[in-house]
Image (cartoon, helix red, strand yellow):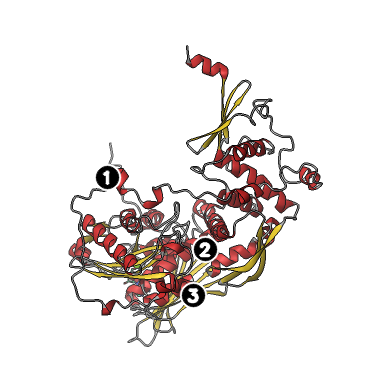
């Protein structure tokens, strides 16, 4: 038999490598920004069109490339950043694989312009799908511009796989945040479809955090500073009362590189133990500096994971440093939501007595040893009971059968007009007398033919969902006026999402008096929605829009109703009195589709007497 192994042609190898390096436009953004930083740029401009699908361009004022280097930069394994394998253990640059440009050029139209300070003229190169189309001398400023157009033009499957512009832009913005936060001394500008999303001058770290996340962030930051032999920590954690339902403000940088580390995240959680409400996540923006020899960043192609030599020590130092900072600021337990003026006392680390930091390194710590002791605080269930009055009022309108809105409702809203047939035609017969709550999670009730077990959270979601959908569709909801207007702060991108949903939100009962890039003023909320929940609802909504939007047949209305239902539904673990239980059961079976939650999960199960009898045989 003849030999059958062949070497893959370069352009094929590059396309394969591209599959690892470039998942979406945001990956291109990351690679190009990192190259600009490695080139010692002090100003970097990011320009994108159509969420990066049409164009991703990065312009820097860095050191540029010679004619030969410009051509070589597109070869695979072409890098100026390491020369030998030993260099891998001393990395001070972002890149080192020499794969990014080659990969990107294999799956897009790339235009490079570059010039070094010492050269009079620069170089312009055009490449399409690994083919060099032209290389010319060019008049161009010192630095480099890389424009990546029509990403995945030769891989339709990948192109079709891309998500909506909202989702892709979110990924790009995330990458931009990470790079910009890691390098506050570099000036950045970011444009999307011609409008400026960020303009960040060279500044200090606090200013950078505030610039990105909005002016209101300033007062919520608690400085964390610690220096030991193995680790230097600097940065901020958010005060517990500003903790979020989402993890959107959690940043670790190791040697100025953004990393994800569930393990270190857990250390922060441990430091916040007891200070956070259930389901809330602390914000943090922390820079860790360690000896490059003690880490291995080479384990993942997109390089957001990292291996530390001595994770346990880092964990202990980090936990203790954050705890110390929280203590220093006399951070009161989260139950007190009033603003405390003593929290804003300026903190000056340098004036601290020069005593050695008291760090307890728990040598015996083993994250896998004892689940119970090491659970992050969010897993300790602490439940908040909504006041009964507001709980009841969530049903306003639902039971009022005489209400003439009911007719309009019947004509609009739902796909299936016929009320779903309950498995038991006698569903409501006995509920009133005999409901009880199991594990503060299920409502159990008897039927003539057996037993009904209802998931209280899902059931309530269904009830609220249909209620909201109805309000939105008939464009008429009752609103409750707030005594004082509520001002909420968002990033421009987040405000945009609220703006897009404004009309629908108004139909649920929200009243907006101001909607600017950073600030949203609310003067009215839907009846029954507690004021304290408003920011949570909107945050949840924003994160749902950003993350969960399926591209096809996306309906903003439906998403809004689902999201609000999710935010406001009674949670598992909340105890309900007899009347509340009964009310929920009745409301559920008054729904058009009582069988499933808004996300299509069963709301109840049944157990027939026959089945029970079989079990006793
Ligand atoms: P890596 O960054 O891993 O070295 P890349 O494919 O991203 O690999 O880049 C290849 C080489 O091209 C880099 O090592 C660098 O020498 C050069 N290069 C890329 N982008 C720039 C830039 N913006 N300015 C100067 N040189 C650059
Ligand atoms: Mg690179």
Q: Earlier in the sequence, mark 3 or mark 1?
A: 3
Q: Position of residue 45 (x, y in %)?
A: 46, 76
Instruction: Rate crowding at label 3 as few (under 14), some (14 to 19) or many (20 or more) other CA atoms within 10 Å.
Output: some
Instruction: Rate crowding at label 1 as few (under 14), some (14 to 19) or many (20 or more) other CA atoms within 10 Å.
Output: few
> Could you say which is closer to the camera, residue 268 or residue 157?
268
Confirm whether residue 374 shows in the render. yes
Confirm whether residue 124 shows in the render. no
**Label 3 sits on residue:** 215
The residue furthest top is 617
**Label 2 sits on residue:** 169
> Could you say which is closer to the camera, residue 557 or residue 475?
475
Q: Is residue 24 above or below residue 586?
A: below
Q: Secondary structure at mark 3?
A: helix
> Could you say which is closer to the camera, residue 63 or residue 575?
575
Q: CA distance from mark 1 to mark 2?
A: 37 Å
- Mark 1 CB in 8 Å range of ligand 1? no
Query: Do the residues under discs 1 and 2 have CB atoms within 8 angstroms?
Result: no
**Label 1 sits on residue:** 368
In the image, taking residue 435 as reference, residue 143 lies left or right, namely left
The N terminus, quarter of image = top left
Q: Earlier in the sequence, mark 1 or mark 2?
A: 2
In the image, taking residue 89 as reference, residue 578 lies left or right, namely right
Q: Secondary structure at mark 1?
A: loop
Q: Position of residue 490 (x, y in %)?
A: 53, 67
Instruction: Rate crowding at label 2 as few (under 14), some (14 to 19) or many (20 or more) other CA atoms within 10 Å.
Output: many
Q: Is residue 341 above or below residue 311?
A: below
């Amino acid at each position: 038999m003849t030999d059958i192994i062949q070497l893959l042609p370069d352009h094929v190898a590059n396309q394969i490598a591209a599959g690892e390096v470039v998942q979406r436009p945001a990956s291109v953004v990351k690679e190009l920004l990192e190259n600009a930083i490695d080139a010692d740029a002090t100003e970097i401009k990011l320009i994108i069109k159509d969420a990066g699908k049409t164009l991703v361009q990065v312009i820097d004022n860095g050191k540029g490339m010679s004619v030969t280097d410009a051509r070589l930069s597109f070869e695979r394994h072409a890098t100026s950043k390491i020369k030998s394998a030993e260099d891998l253990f001393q990395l001070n640059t972002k890149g080192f694989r020499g794969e990014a440009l080659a990969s990107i050029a294999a799956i897009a139209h790339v235009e490079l312009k570059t010039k070094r300070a010492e050269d009079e003229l620069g170089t312009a190169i055009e490449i399409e799908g690994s083919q060099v189309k032209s290389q010319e001398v060019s008049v161009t400023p010192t630095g480099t511009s890389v424009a990546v157009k029509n990403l995945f033009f030769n891989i339709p499957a990948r192109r079709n796989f891309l998500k909506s512009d909202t989702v892709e832009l979110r990924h790009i913005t995330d990458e931009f945040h990470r790079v910009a936060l890691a390098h506050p001394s570099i000036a950045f500008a970011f444009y999307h479809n011609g409008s400026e999303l960020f303009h960040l001058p060279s500044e200090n770290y606090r200013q950078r955090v505030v610039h990105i996340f909005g002016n209101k962030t300033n007062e919520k930051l608690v400085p964390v500073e610690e220096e030991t032999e193995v680790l230097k920590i600097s940065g901020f954690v958010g005060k517990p009362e500003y903790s979020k339902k989402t993890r959107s403000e959690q940043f670790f940088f190791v040697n100025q590189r953004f990393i994800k580390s569930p393990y270190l995240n857990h250390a922060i959680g441990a430091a916040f133990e007891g200070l956070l409400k259930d389901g809330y996540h602390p914000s943090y923006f922390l820079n860790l500096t360690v000896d490059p020899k003690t880490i291995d960043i080479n384990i993942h192609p997109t390089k957001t994971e990292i291996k530390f030599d001595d994770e346990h020590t880092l964990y202990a130092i980090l936990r203790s440093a954050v705890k110390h900072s929280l203590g220093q600021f006399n951070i009161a337990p989260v139950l007190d939501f009033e603003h405390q003026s003593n929290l804003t006392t300026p903190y000056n680390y340098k004036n601290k007595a020069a005593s050695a930091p008291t760090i307890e390194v728990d040598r015996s710590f083993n994250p896998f040893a004892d689940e119970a002791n090491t659970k992050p605080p969010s897993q300790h269930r602490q439940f908040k009971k909504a006041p009964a009055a507001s709980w009841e009022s969530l049903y306003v309108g639902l039971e009022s059968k005489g209400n003439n809105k009911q007719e309009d409702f019947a004509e609009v809203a739902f796909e299936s007009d016929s009320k779903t047939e309950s498995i038991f035609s006698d569903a409501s017969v006995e509920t009133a007398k005999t409901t009880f709550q199991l594990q503060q999670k299920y409502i159990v009730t008897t039927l003539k033919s057996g037993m009904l077990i209802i998931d209280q959270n899902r059931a309530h979601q269904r009830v609220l969902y249909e209620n909201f959908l109805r309000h939105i569709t008939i464009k008429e909801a009752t609103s409750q006026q707030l005594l004082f207007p509520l001002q909420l702060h968002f990033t421009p991108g987040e405000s945009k999402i609220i703006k897009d949903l404004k009309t629908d939100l108004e139909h649920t009962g929200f009243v907006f008096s101001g909607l600017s890039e950073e600030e949203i003023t609310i003067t009215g909320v839907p009846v029954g929605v507690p004021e304290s929940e408003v920011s949570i609802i909107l945050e949840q909504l924003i994160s749902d829009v950003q993350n969960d939007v399926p591209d096809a047949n996306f309906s903003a209305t439906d998403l809004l109703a689902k999201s609000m239902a999710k935010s406001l539904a009674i949670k598992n673990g909340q105890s309900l009195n007899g009347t509340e239980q009964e009310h929920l059961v009745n409301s559920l079976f008054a729904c058009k589709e009582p069988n499933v939650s808004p996300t299509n999960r069963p709301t109840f199960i049944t157990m027939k007497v026959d089945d029970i009898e079989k079990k006793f045989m």
